[in-house]
Amino acid sequence: MTKFIVRRLLATIPVLFGLSIILFAFIHFIPGDPATAILGQHATAVRIAEMRTYLGLDRPLPEQYLKYVAGLFEGDFGTSFVNGQAVLTEFLRKFPATVELTVAAMIFAAGVGIPLGRFAARHVQRWPDGGVTIISLLGISIPVFVLGLTLQYIFAVQLHWLPASSRFEARSALELQTNFVLIDAWLMPGWSIDQKVGAFIDGVRHLILPAIALGSIPLAIITRITRASVIDVSNEDYVRTARAKGLTEKRIDGRHIMRNAWLPVVTVIGLQVGGLLAGAVITETVFAWNGVGRWVVDAIGDRDYFIVQSTILMFALIFLVVNLLVDIGYAFLNPRIRYA
Amino acid sequence: MALLSVDGLIVRFRTHEGTIHAVNGVSFELDEGEMLGVVGESGCGKSVTSLALMRLLPKPAGRIEGGAVRFDGQDLLACSEAEMREIRGRDMAMIFQDPMSSLNPVLTVEEQMVETIRAHRPVGAAEARKRAIELLGMVGMPEPETRLGAFPHQFSGGMRQRVMIAMALALAPKLLIADEPTTALDVTIQAQVLELLRRLTADSGTAAILITHDLGVVAGMTQRINVMYAGFIVEAATTADLFARPGHPYTVGLLHSIPRVDALEGEELIPIEGTPPDQRRAPVGCPFAPRCAWRLPVCWETNPTLEPLLAGEAVVTTGPAATHRSACHNRPTMAEATAGRPLRDGFVPAPAPGSEADELTTVARP
Amino acid sequence: MAASIVATPLASRASSGLWRDAWGRLLRNRPALLGLVFIAIFVLTAVLAPVIAPYDPGALYPPPPGASSGATGPYPPRSEHLMGQDLQGRDELTRVLYGARISLLVGLGSVIIGVLLGGLMGALAGGAGGRVDNVLMRVVDALLAVPGILLAIGIVAWLDRGLPQITLAVAVTNAPIFARLLRGGLLAVREVDYVVAARSVGASRARLLLRHMLPNAITPIIVAATLALATAIIDIAGLGFLGLGPPDPRTPEWGTMLTDSTKFLREAPYLIFFPGLAIVIAAVGFNLLGDGLRESIDPRLKK
């Protein structure tokens, strides 16, 4: 098992290396001249020269690359051209908002998707299965922004059941410390329990629509894989043995079928984290969510390349770490690998 | 009263591609403590019959569409699913061909054995664990206490099958069905596992049905044998009678396609020509006709029923005095059975009605 | 992105029989047929847009009579403009119809380029083996480490906005899938070749095996490409929505038509509904067909 973990960690290194090269190339090989691209067409020659020196473009290539990687290890991810703030600091400040959204979306996707998949598997080829298949199909065929806008229109504009955007009511006096609204509600000094609960619920209400929109694709995929996994496992010989021993259906379902069916589902959930991070960009734009996704989109418009480069790097890193954890988790859950 | 009585069992599979007639009216009985062998090639219905007995047919395709089954005085086909659940494991147990895929890979041996015991008896985990160790010892597992916490993939094939046997006999069932228990094992291990089965069932007085495609497996084990083909029982006899005087061309064929150490030098293996029938159509006439070297014109039209070899003899279905029966219009003689082919002058197997030239005619000519 | 597809070489069957069986199964698969219908609607709309569209997609049209003067739009559907008019007064129906052209072209383009790019990488990796294989697959892994649309966003940010850039970006995003498929297929073929050589079989047999293996290797790619097309259409619209699409506002790209739509969500939901519906129909079509293809080529024996 430890050998497996070590091997897996080592396998990540070449990928990190490749990633760093790609992202290095991102700034240093912008089509045309990077400095001009960043400063825009109207920049003076002097400013362009300054920018080129700042970017280190006149140094030999390998030196530039090493400087870049060294900077990464020191936490220097560049600074924003718009407001001069350190990219890493700004990223860490805004990131919790995206995390809150992503976690909520994952809870929705797995919390609804897994039971739905099991339900479909129990009624294979009959009406309920068909209905679930349709839901699944729509989940992957409706773009996140279309779904988000539709949800906004129905539930916020027409029915007024849920708020249309933002993370909490504008007129709320909530101050962000951790930047997790659901945590900060409880951290407010001097607020009564009622106020805290109110702010918490307000935060939850604002999370619902974006979480559903963002989680729609993982929901579809998790439902599908759960259904397929349960069906496959149900046809295995050891399930037949369990029946031959006279066990109750409940026991067979829980111990024999689900314990084995979980494995592929867990892997897929891990992979979906990546999809959620990517989808957050669009969801935050639709719902005016003050997280990293929206920050990146604005940065692209502002040609603030360091932000774009660093965000992609951070998201890729997170995705890699999650995949690593999922692989290790899978090896742990599957006795055939754990006790190889 | 026989422990198990099967009467005219019919099992069909309804699939997208049509209906498969897996079992077409099978009848047999089994006394307490008897071991019955069921022999036949793949697809003959031997496994399906036993799955039907336990009502474990794959749903929704597999259906019992006729016949009756009585076990220990109960009508098994009329039982509710809850009643069947109690019977399974406790009164009737089954072990399967591939022990690797038949054991849950994510549960330890202890968990799988203990759950069997506690599903039918109100015992605590500790007591069940003790019983599990006892059982593992009974099947010859070295160091059972330490092996309990292991997972199935950590055992060899033979050991895995012993675990399955231990699980099956945990509650001292009245009937044990063993479906090809040794087919997936190495030859050297096969003998050990079979001997274990024989000893355990004899010691505990458990009746057993041993299903296999290999006549060699049943030779030293069973008291009686049913030979099945295409969903029918084509011959039923005591083991001794079957080997001494096979009464059906298919049995003759089976006996002659086994290489034997004591065979005369130069004696050829006589394979059974042709392939198993397509069971998507209900059979017309004897199902073995297309491959039979003894066939008469009537064989193409009427399916023979299972009748005693000696006409008019009373039918005894179980025990050492069981009547030797076969379903054949033109039974091989003793000499033909020994030779493996018909020995009658000028005898030509009847060609198929109408249609194509029969390639088997050339083979059967002496 | 597209759900992962595993290439499984089937047991040997004559290739013509394989196709005929698969085709027959596909025709009997009702959801797949529905998908084909949706795709047909999509493609026909794209092809016939200039013929069936009532107006010009970039031109501005007058507001309905009685509208407040000075305002430019949007205006709700009426008989002259069945899907309404957008913020500048352009005819929405025409733009939706012409939008199909763009989605189809860019979508097809990105998938074809992705197949070529990825296929080339995979073929090189699988064919050359050794260090080339290692390096190429690390590149693929690095590309896959950047989740989904983020990679496309990065590429478009790098290249600047526009339709050709979007095409390339989405192509690079789905290339890794095809790289892996082709490499896997090639590795399987190599193993078979080895066995054949070991058995000293004549060349003609080897050619027959290639004729078996090659169709088997191509079919997972066809399935993957169909599903990738569905994802591509959605991703392209997503990129357009974020403002990374064609800079010319007269170009009727479906996603771009929805940019900043949150502003007029209340007043003009129809501006969101119609292009949104169009995207969904196209995506559903290709998803249904892709699933149907996958099922008909590799039928599940246990049901």
Image (spheres, coloured by chain):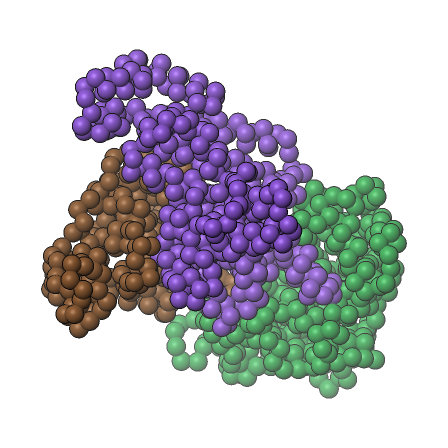
Is residue B230 among the parts visible in the rendering?
no
The image position of residue C217, as x and y in percent, is 36, 47
The quadrant in which residue C191 appears is top left
Q: Quadrant of residue B247?
A: bottom right
Q: Colour of chain A?
A: purple
Task: Look at the image and give the colour of chain B.
Answer: green
Query: How many circles with numbers are drawn on the protein?
Result: 0
- On screen, C170 above or below C72? above
Front-lying residue, A192 or A75 = A192
Compared to residue B293, the image places residue B185 above or below, namely: above
> Residue drawn 28% across and 67% down?
C37
Residue C175 rendering spot, x and y as whole percentages: 33, 41
Residue furthest bottom in the image: B312
Q: Is residue A44 left or right of residue C155?
A: left
In front of the other: B230 or A201? A201
Outermost residue toward the front in this view: A190
Q: Position of residue C255 (x, y in %)?
A: 28, 52
Q: Viewed as shown, does residue B138 lie left or right of A86?
A: right
Percent x, y for residue B9?
Answer: 65, 78
Q: Where on the picture, by quarter, is residue C152?
A: top left
Quadrant in which the N terminus of chain A is drawn: top right
Image vertical order of residue C101 relative to residue A86, above or below: below
Can residue A39 be seen here? The reply is yes
Residue displayed at 43% across by 43% down = A290
The residue sitting at 48% across, 43% down in the picture is A97
Classify the position of the C terminus of chain A by image quarter: top right
Chain coloured brown: which letter?
C
Going 46% across and 71% down the picture, which residue do you hit?
A: B16
Q: Is residue B99 above or below residue A4?
A: below
